[in-house]
Image (spheres, rainbow, N blue to C red):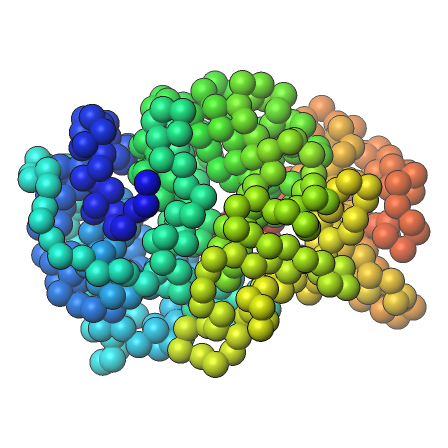
Amino acid sequence: MTISSLDAFLDARLDTGLADLPVLITPAGEWSVADIRTARTAGALQAALSCNAVAVRLADRLKLALAIIALDGQVGRLLLLSSDMSDAEARDLLAQFGGDALLTDMASEGGKDSPEIIWRETPKPGKGADRMARPHVTTEWIFATSGTTGIPKLVAHSLASLTRTTKLFSGGPRRWGQMYNIARFAGIQVFLQGITGGSLLLPAPETGLPEQLAFLAQNGCTALSATPTLWRKILMTPGHEILPLAQVTLGGEIADGVILSALARAYPSARVVHIYASTEAGTAFSVRDGRPGFPLSYLQDAPGSVRLKVIDGRLFVRTRNTRATYLNRQEAFADAEGFVDTGDRVEIDGDRCLFLGRENGAINVGGNKVYPEEVEHVLLAHPAVDLARVSARKSPITGQIVVAEVVAAPGADSAALPVALKTWCADRLPHWKRPAMIRLVAQLAATSGGKIDRAQT
């Protein structure tokens, strides 16, 4: 089934006998198709629907979900801005976008070229028309890159490209937990899978992880997607064991053997899937065999219409995302054949292609490149380590040295652990990759996207 618009898909839900199945589930209540369509009567949404190009920056997850469903197929361009990005980033991206209006529930970030539409009222479920005969256009969905290598840029997708790998009611309706920010590329993937494949659970982001997991468990969450870092934190949190998961998905960071095995043990009835995607390339491929990296055979015959190649140790990906340049810029992110340089370093090991780390994150130790992720995976393999972060420190002799911060597992001998970890690393890493210093910390920060926060080092 091809999804022409989210509105059309809501009609399809009615035709498949799922009219009473909630589309959205929040701590405040459930939202059916009819409830969602009633929300369109909100004055702010009506104003946004009258525009051709709309930017959306909403802190309220429910408002964001309702806005996306309402605006797709009705506006020509839809820019999703994360509420947790800096105001300066938001202003720059709005200038790049050049839209008609900004729909927001936050402090003023608009300008004379981007009038604000303020959504103040709290959405409440209310029965309305099940079906709405509305003309629709093909909306261009716009996302911001992470900006880790410079100023964030804008990338365009279509609903077709975003749902290329979406499973519609595969194996029966599932309840997907939304842990990512919906306005980020990883978040929209979960959002679209949730509303098209069953129901989407929206825990309150202002609550702690224990409260969010309790909400997911109480509402029968059967599918959950998170970064490896967030999954490690979930497995450290009491209550994770009662989640009735049938699908466990990882993405955004390298999935090593330790976390893949830990998830298989924690949720033996669940299918564990590692997704590889980027804002520029879109969703590329998934790996389901429980092993790190991906099969070497993917370089000759990748799943679906995807093509992969490795040049000088860097992974290049080509998908169906037809736009090869950033929005409103001449700068291309794909080569003449449509391949996107992912910036990920890989190495071939037997029948496997393994991820080493980000090219721009390498540590230079006396002319030798060290990828922090590679050292972190060795540290995380130690049974007394729950979390690890590796970074560089300047050295007058080698230029840089490797340093590590670790969160000890409960019951670990904290006094003896740094020395034990140095011995552990010495047995598994060449000398230039071994941490010169290992420091125990109570916790390690994660970004709003669930990745280990390397800016904090």
Q: Position of residue 215 (x, y in %)?
A: 37, 28
* Residue occupying the point 56% across, 59% down: 318
Work out whether residue 134 or residue 149 is closer to the camera in this orientation and state it: 134
Q: Is residue 124 above or below residue 271?
A: below
Work out whether residue 26 or residue 11 is closer to the camera in this orientation and state it: 11
* Residue occupying the point 49% across, 28% down: 247
Q: How many marks?
A: 0
Residue 382 is left or right of residue 295, and the answer is right
Residue 242 is left or right of residue 352, and the answer is left
* Residue occupying the point 17% across, 68% down: 51
* Residue occupying the point 37% across, 63% down: 142
Residue 157 visible in the picture: yes
Q: Position of residue 263 (x, y in %)?
A: 60, 27
Q: Position of residue 110 (x, y in %)?
A: 27, 72
Quadrant placement of the C terminus: bottom right
Quadrant placement of the N terminus: top left
Residue 251 visible in the picture: no
Residue 455 is left or right of residue 365, and the answer is left
Q: Give the quarter of the image for residue 158.
A: bottom left
Q: Position of residue 332 (x, y in %)?
A: 53, 75
Work out whether residue 69 or residue 116 is closer to the camera in this orientation and state it: 69
Q: Is residue 312 above or below residue 8?
A: below
Q: Give the quarter of the image for residue 54.
A: bottom left
Q: Give the quarter of the image for residue 183.
A: bottom left
